[in-house]
Image (cartoon, grey):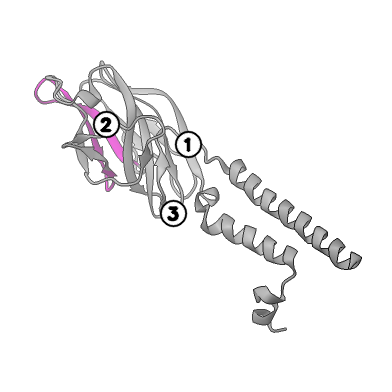
């Protein structure tokens, strides 16, 4: 069978063409529907003076973990840098963090995270030079790292600064596309509903035209 002729849009019935269109739209216009957000919940892992928080965001679609003890899969480490009365610091181990005027950027909930550019950044210092990470602030760090076979991906880490550093959770998006700060799942049902709606409209249109042809 000549599949190129069979799949030629002119040879397909209206319902077939609309079905093909809906499928193509779901892959091209709405590619995020086929991505997955991998979220790891953490019940407050903290780090004071000499302590560190080691974070593994996950790999190849799997969740990660956080600990006060170093482990081989660590992507980031957060701690109070023992200089100038301790300053909150995040370091990427072969990974990077989004910056804002030389500081670690604080993303508000829902903000898009798509680029990171530094391997080590302070959130603030004792003098309070960075108002975006003021003492007592909880926000989202934007990060990039290599997640196994998923390659370079974007993610976020939920962090509280004050009195020390505490991590409450983190997530990454498997396709390499942007991720919304704080997002734990992609709203796939909306896209699926749209595709189903297109198919339903196609069925109605096809049946209506068929009835009109029979009546003629």
Tell me where residue 144 appears, x and y as whole percent: 33, 46
The residue drawn where x is 72% and y is 53% is 201
The tag on residue 202 is: none
Which residue in the structure is indicated by mark 1?
39
Query: Could you say which quadrant of the image residue 138 lies in?
Result: top left
> Is residue 90 magenta-colored?
yes
- Left or right, residue 152 beside residue 96: right
- Left or right, residue 113 beside residue 209: left
The quadrant the C terminus occupies is bottom right
- Left or right, residue 132 beside residue 152: left
The tag on residue 150 is: 3
| Res 50 visible | no
The residue drawn where x is 17% and y is 26% is 130
Q: What range of the chain is rendered magenta?
A: 74-96
Quick check: 202 above or below 54? below
Query: Could you say which quadrant of the image residue 109 lies in?
Result: top left
């Amino acid at each position: 069978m000549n599949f190129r002729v069979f799949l030629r849009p002119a040879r397909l019935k209206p319902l077939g063409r609309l079905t093909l269109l809906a499928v193509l739209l779901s892959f091209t216009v709405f590619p995020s529907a086929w991505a997955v957000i991998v979220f790891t919940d953490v019940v407050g892992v903290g780090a004071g003076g000499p302590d560190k928080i080691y974070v593994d965001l996950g790999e190849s679609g799997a969740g990660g973990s956080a600990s006060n003890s170093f482990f081989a899969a660590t992507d980031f480490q957060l701690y109070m840098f023992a200089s100038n009365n301790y300053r909150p610091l995040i370091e990427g181990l072969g990974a990077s963090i989004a910056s804002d005027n030389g500081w670690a950027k604080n993303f508000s909930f829902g903000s898009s995270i798509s680029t990171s550019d530094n391997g080590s950044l302070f959130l603030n210092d004792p003098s309070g030079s960075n108002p975006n990470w003021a003492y007592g602030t909880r926000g989202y760090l934007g990060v990039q790292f290599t997640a196994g076979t998923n390659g370079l991906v974007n993610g976020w880490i939920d962090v509280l600064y004050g009195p020390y550093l505490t991590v409450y959770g983190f997530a990454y998006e498997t396709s390499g596309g942007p991720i919304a700060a704080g997002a734990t799942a992609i709203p796939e049902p909306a896209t699926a509903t749209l595709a189903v709606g297109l198919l339903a409209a196609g069925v109605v249109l096809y049946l209506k035209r068929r009835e009109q042809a029979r009546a003629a």
